[in-house]
Image (tube, rainbow, N blue to C red):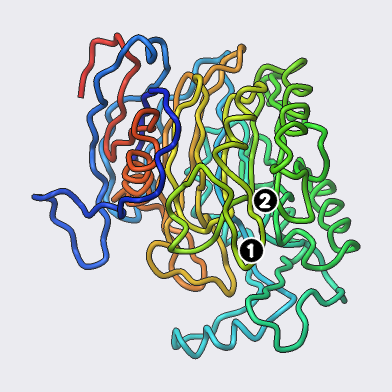
Amino acid sequence: MAVVGAVLGCASAAPPEEPIPSPPEGVDVGPGELPAIPVVAPALDTATAGVPVLGDTVSVPVVDSTPAAEPRAPPQDVRVCAGGDVLLGNNLDSAWAQRASQRLGRSITATPEPGLLLDPLRPLVADADVVLLNIEGAIGEGPASSKCRRFARNCYAFRQPTAAATALARLLDGALVGNVANNHAMDAGQFGFEATMRNLGLAGVHVTGADTIGTIVATQAGDTVVVLGFSTAQAGPDPRDLVAVGRHVARAAETHPRVIVTMHMGAEGVAAQRTPNASERYLGEDRGNTVAFARRAVDAGAAVVFGHGPHVMRGAEWYHGALIIYSLGNLLTYGPFSLSEPLNRGGLACVALDRRGTVTSAVFRSTRQEPPGILRWDPTGRAAWLVDSLSQLDFPETAATLSGEAVIHAPGSAWRP
């Protein structure tokens, strides 16, 4: 299992000027491949003292074997795993499946069995108390209002079958949280948005991002976490209003120390791998300043901030003891998505939170997708390599440092990389 550790500094984000680095010399890399690179933590100063990172050295199984789980968090900790965008088929448009069938040379169905699509994900979340995923589209059946005008360009409408809600709820023994604060939650109109929340709720999935009230999630052990979702789209609280963001997060933190914030923000595509500390625009839309938003959420009491929306991996940083991952990319997007490099890279970030809401461990599990959206665990850890490289470029003093086959322990521990 490829896992990661992280270390903390403190500085503002660097402007996105440098190109994304090539693999270091001496690393054997095939065409188009990005290896998992073990990284040594930089020297720590007093500002980093007490910042927690955790893990054990583990061996990497052969490709396509089931990875062994890391040791569970202490009983008093809650383990939360988060992934990026999830789309389990699309019943609003079947033309993409016909095109994919021609391109791939085999029959592709637009709406396969959602549970089968999720099967490769199960061993990666088996040790989680809570799993948080971005629901990239509506969930429902039957007629729906049209989102895209005829001959419209750069317009996509996604709706998953109702069975997707049940499949998501059955993904793990713990709690599944679905974020609906994104730009595809209302692809079937307002009625479809309401149907999505109803279908998720009836299946037993916790819904976040529909309003400004934190979603309280209880674990099987009786502990709780609170999740808030934000998006620059119509669905979800607006992350660009930083005063309101602080108010919403602080309200949740007043009564619950374990506060998790998720954001659907930023530009999209291969050109959007860097994380600027500035407002981003995409297709003429203001997609917000992800750095300003995430840090404001942490200042108001968030323990972790998970990002998605750019469809690519982005960097991560430790800020005031909290972990911020700016984009988790595409996790499982079965549909009309481009899955060329690096859009096919995703992953699960898993953290353990103690009773005070402090992150006591952080690991990353890299995944990849094969067209038209078949999830595979990636033992090469290429997504982790991307996050590590981008973190050092964009957050040189606060970067989360990831290693492909081991983790960096907390400062002061006897073990050193």
Neighbours of disc 1 within 10 Å: few (<14), some (14-19), many (20+)? many
Q: Quadrant of residue 61?
A: top left
Q: Earlier in the sequence, mark 1 or mark 2?
A: 1
Residue 77 vs 62, above or below: the answer is: above
Q: Tell me how many marks there are.
A: 2
Residue 295: where, in percent of width, then height?
A: 57, 30
Residue 96: where, in percent of width, then height?
A: 60, 82
Pick the quarter of the image with the N terminus. Answer: top left
Q: CA distance from mark 1 to mark 2?
A: 10 Å
Residue 151, label in figure: none
Q: Which residue is nearer to you in this view: 177 or 270?
A: 270
Query: Mark 1 near mark 2, Cβ–Cβ under 8 Å?
Result: yes
Q: Which residue is mark 2?
A: 168
Residue pictured at 46% horizontal, 87% vertical: 103
Residue 91 vs 180, above or below: the answer is: below
Q: Which residue is nearer to you in this view: 124 or 100?
A: 100
Q: Which residue is mark 1?
A: 88
Callout 2 amino acid: Leu
